[in-house]
C-alpha cells in the first residue's frame, strides 16, 4: 500500500506538498492515518511535466523522508502537472524500478492498492501484454504491470476504455482463479494535460482518496495533507474522475461511475 | 532514537532475533512500542565476532526490514557475541557511516539516545578527541563521537572509567552551555569477551532497556522481542551492567550504579 | 561482461582474492586486462558455503572496489567453496537483483558472457521456464534466466545434462531467429560440493578462463590474479570442468568436451 | 581525481554534455584520456540555476554512467548556468555527501585535484573554519573543506581574494608541514551569474582544463568532449578565469594570473 498525490493547475513548487504542513506526503510516509500499513519507507518518486513533452522522473528506493535529492528537486521544480508517491511494499523488492510513478513516453501512472493473489496471477497477466509492453517492464510490481496492460489495451487512444477494460479483465481473471483476496485500486494517470484518477475495489474497502480544488489548481491525495476537513472531499468509490487544465487556468472536473457492472465481491459502497 | 540488541552466550544464528517472533528487531523498526519515534527506517547494522579478533561489520543506510543482504547474513552467521541496531535519525544524514555499530579494532559500540544540544556542542566535543580518534571519525553522529571520546579516555585500558568519564565530561559541558535538552544514553560496548551496557539519562527519562538471560546466553534489548513479560527484566536506570562469557558457557552478570554522583537534571529514577 | 572467481578447497579467507596482489578481482574491476569492457563498476557479489546447507549471499549494485560491506565480509568469512563476481552491465539495470552470484536453495551460479540478441529472445526464453522457476526470477539479466532454465532442465538431478541442454536450446533459438551476435558463456555452478565451470562460445571468441590449483585448493578465474604465468592454466574452449573436494582435502579435477556437436557459428577453437 | 564541466550561456538542456558525443562526461567517467585515474565511478553530481536563487542540487554515490535519475534530470532540465561532476575518490568514502558540486546558499563549487598530505593536514585545516562554516561540512573530502575555507575567507564579498587566500594558506600549511605531495587544484565556483575557474598546482603538473566558447555559451571542462581540437582551448596553468553572462546573452571572458607570488614547489608553468 502506498500514499500519493497528483496535482494539476497553475505552476507550483512541489516542495510544499511533500514537506510542509502537519500531514504532508513525507509525514504520511512515517505516520499515515488511513493506510493499513502505517509506514511507507520503501521508496519514493516524483514525475513532473516541464518543457519537454516527456515528463521528468525521479525514483529512489530509500525512505522519502530522508531523501535529500528528492527534497532538492521539489525545492526548485515548479510544474503544472506532477505526481508524487511514497511506497510501502506489498511484496516486490525495494528497488528504484519498483517505485512509482511509472512512465511510458508522455504518460505517467501511479497506484495505491493491490491485486489480490498477484503472485499466483502474475504469469497469466504477463501473457496478456503486447510484446512492446512486455519489453517495457523493468520491475516486479503489480502496479507497473497494470500500467502496461492499460497501454496494451489502448490507453493512448481511448484512456477511459483502456482503464476500464484492464481493471475488468484483471478482476475477471482473479475471480476465475478463485482468489479470495480483493483487488483494490486507487490510481492516477496523466498525459500532462488531463489527470484521471480512479477509486475502485472488488470489495467494499476501496482505499481512501480525496480531492481539494482551489482557485488555481486541483490536488488528489490518498489522505488529506492537513486537518482542515472542509477543503478535502472524499472521492466516492467506484468512480473515475477527470481533471482538465483549460487555457486561462480553469480546472474542469468531471466525475462518472467507473464500472457500470459491479465486479465487486460484495457491495461496492463507501 | 534507535532500537538495538546485544547478545553474548553460546553460538546462535542471528536471524531469529531480527526477524522471528512477534516483536523482533526488524518488527520494532516499523512499529516500536516504547520509542519516541515509532519508525526506525534510517539504516541498520550488525557487528559480530567470529574467528578473527576484529569483529565483522555490516551497515546499510536503507530500512533494515527491507535489507536483503542483512537478512542473508543473519541466516548464515552464528556467533557468540553480536550487536544489531536499527536507526531513527535524530539529525545526522542517512548514510552507512552513520549507522551502528561502530568499530575500532576489536571494539564494537552502539547507542540509543541523544546528546541534547549536540549541534551546539559538537565542535567543542571534537576538540577533546586525540588526533588518532579524530582521524577515525567517519560520520556525523553524536554516537560515533561518544565512542571515540571513550577511546580517547582510555576505553581499552580501563573501560568502566572511560565510559564514566566520557558521560560525565559530555554532560558537564552540556550543563555549562546551559543546554536544556537532556543527555540520554543506553549504550552497549564489547571487545568480544565482555559486553557492557549502560542505561543512564541526565533527566528521569532514560530510554528503556531489558535483559533476558537463559541457560545458554544473555540478550540485552531496547524493548522486549515478545510479549512474555516474565522473561524480560528492566535494567534499572543509572546502571552499568557487565556480561561475561566464561569458559564452560556460563554468563556472569554484574550490575553496579553507573554514576555515583548524580549528574541528573532531576531525579535519576525509573 | 564480467569478471569472476570460484574457489574450492581448504577453508580460506576470501579477502586475499578480492583485494590483495597486483591484479585481484577488485583491481580487475577497475582495470581489466582481458575483458572487452575494461571497467566492471556495475555491482559485485559474493556467495559462500558455511554451516547451513544454503550458501550465504551478498550483492550490491555499487562498484565493488568501493564497497565497504563487501570488504568487511571477505575479511571475516572463511569458506571451502565460494564465488565472487564484479559486473559490467551489458544492458540490464544496475540493481542488486541483477548482480551475481544467483542462488536457488543450495545452488549458486555466476556468469560472464552474453546471449546475443537477448532483448529479442527474452520473451521466448521466459516461456521455456517452469512456473516455479519463472516465479523465482527477480531481475532482468540473461544470466539469471540461464540459471533458471538450467533448473527447469533438471540441474538438481543431472547437472551436466541440464547445462548442456540449456546452452544448446538457447543457441538453437538464437540461430533460428537469425541473430548474428554470438552467444558466449563462461559459467560457474556449485551445490557446495562440486564446482562446475564451462567455457564455451557460439563463435571462436570464448571469454578467457584460467585455473590455478595448488596443494590446498583450486581457483578458477576470468583472468589471472597476478603475473606469475606459470601457475595459471587456460581452460580450453568448449570445455566443462568439474572440481570436487574429497574428504582429506584432495581436489579432483575432471575436464571434458562441453558440446560434442559443435553448435558454433564457426570453429569452436581457441 | 575527477572530471567536471561548467556551463554558462543561453539556456541549454544538460543531457547533451553528459551523454552525447564521443567523449561526453559520462564516457570520460569510464574511459578518461587525461586523468591519472582512468575510471571515475565513485559518484556523480549536478548543480543548476533555475527560478529560485539557490541552485538545484543532485548527487549520488553510484557510477554516473548507470545513474538513471541523473540521466532523467539532464533530459528535462534546461539551464543558463550548471555544473556537472564525476568522481574518482582519492580517499574519502563513496557517499553522496562527498560528491560534487557542493552548495552553500546561492554558491556552487566543484573541484578536481588534491591537497597533498590531506589526512595529515585535515585537523589543522578544520581549525581555520568559522563556526558557521564548520557546521556546514557534511562529508570528509578536501574539496568541501576548501570550499568552506573560501567562504570563511570572504568568498561572498570578494571572491577573487578569498580563492587566492585559501589556496595560499593551504599551500603554506602544506609546505610548513614538509608535505612532499603536491597540492593541485582545478576548481569552478559560481553564484549563478559569474563562473570562476582556477587552474593551479604547487608543482608543474596542474590537472588539465579546457575552454570552449561559441556564440551562445561557454563551457569549461576537465577534458574535451570530442576530438575537434580546434574548438577546445587549454586554460593556461596558474590562471583564474571569470566568465560572465551579460544581458543580451554575451559571455565575457576575463583571464588573469592566479597567484602573483609563485607558491610552487617548482616552476608553475605549462
Image (cartoon, coloured by chain):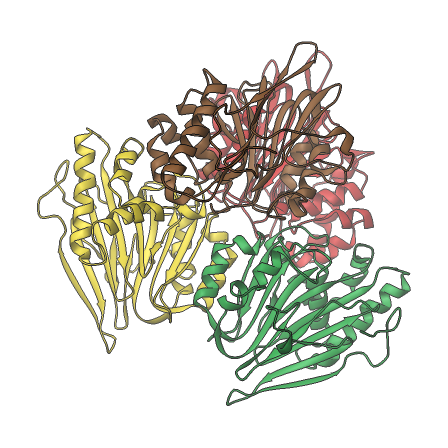
Chain colours: A red, B yellow, C green, D brown
Residue A222 visible, this orientation: no
Question: Which of C103 and B159 lies nearest the eye of the viewer?
Answer: B159
Answer whether residue B92 is visible to the viewer in this image. Answer: yes
Q: Quadrant of the N terminus of chain C?
A: bottom right
Horizontal arrangement in the rendering, residue C181 relative to residue D98 (left or right):
right
Looking at the image, which residue sits at the far bottom? C248
Residue at 60% across / 18% down in the picture? D51
Residue A222 occupies which quadrant of the picture?
Answer: top right
Query: In which quadrant will I find the C terminus of chain C?
Result: bottom right
Image quarter of residue A200: top right
In the picture, measured across the screen, residue D163 lies left or right of residue C199, that is left
Outermost residue toward the front in this view: D267
Give percent across and percent down for residue B187: 26, 51
Q: Is residue B215 left or right of residue C57?
A: left
Question: Is D30 drawn above or below residue D174 in the view shown?
Answer: below
Q: Would you place residue A266 above or below residue C266 in this image?
A: above
Q: Position of residue C185 (x, y in %)?
A: 74, 68
Q: Nearer the viewer, residue A137 or A112?
A: A137
* Residue B89 x/y as whole percent: 38, 41
Determine whether D80 is above or below A116 in the image: above
Amino acid at each position: 500500500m502506498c500514499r500519493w498525490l497528483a496535482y494539476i493547475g497553475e505552476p507550483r513548487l512541489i516542495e510544499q506538498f511533500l514537506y510542509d504542513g502537519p500531514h504532508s506526503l513525507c509525514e504520511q510516509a512515517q505516520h499515515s492515518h488511513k493506510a493499513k500499513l502505517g509506514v511507507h519507507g520503501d521508496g519514493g518518486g516524483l514525475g513532473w511535466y516541464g518543457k519537454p513533452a516527456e515528463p521528468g522522473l525521479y525514483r529512489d528506493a530509500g525512505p522519502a523522508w530522508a531523501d535529500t535529492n528528492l527534497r532538492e528537486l521539489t525545492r526548485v521544480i515548479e510544474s503544472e502537472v506532477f505526481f508524487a508517491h511514497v511506497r510501502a511494499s506489498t511484496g516486490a523488492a525495494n528497488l528504484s524500478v519498483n517505485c512509482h510513478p511509472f512512465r511510458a513516453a508522455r504518460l505517467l501512472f501511479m497506484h495505491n492498492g493491490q491485486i489480490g493473489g498477484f503472485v499466483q496471477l502474475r504469469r497469466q497477466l504477463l501473457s496478456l501484454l503486447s510484446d512492446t509492453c512486455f519489453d517495457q517492464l523493468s520491475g516486479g510490481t503489480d502496479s507497473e504491470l497494470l500500467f502496461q496492460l492499460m497501454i496494451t489495451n489502448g490507453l493512448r487512444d481511448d484512456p477511459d476504455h483502456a482503464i476500464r477494460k484492464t481493471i475488468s479483465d484483471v478482476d475477471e481473471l482473479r475471480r476465475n482463479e478463485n482468489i479470495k483476496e480483493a483487488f483494490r485500486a486507487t490510481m492516477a494517470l496523466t498525459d500532462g494535460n488531463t489527470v484521471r484518477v480512479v477509486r475502485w475495489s472488488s470489495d467494499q474497502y476501496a482505499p481512501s482518496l480525496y480531492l481539494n480544488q482551489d482557485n488555481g489548481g486541483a490536488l488528489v491525495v490518498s489522505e488529506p495533507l492537513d486537518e482542515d476537513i472542509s477543503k478535502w472531499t472524499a472521492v466516492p468509490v467506484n468512480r473515475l474522475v477527470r481533471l482538465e487544465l483549460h487555457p486561462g487556468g480553469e480546472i474542469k472536473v468531471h466525475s462518472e461511475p467507473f464500472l457500470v457492472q459491479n465486479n465487486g465481491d460484495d457491495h461496492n459502497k463507501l
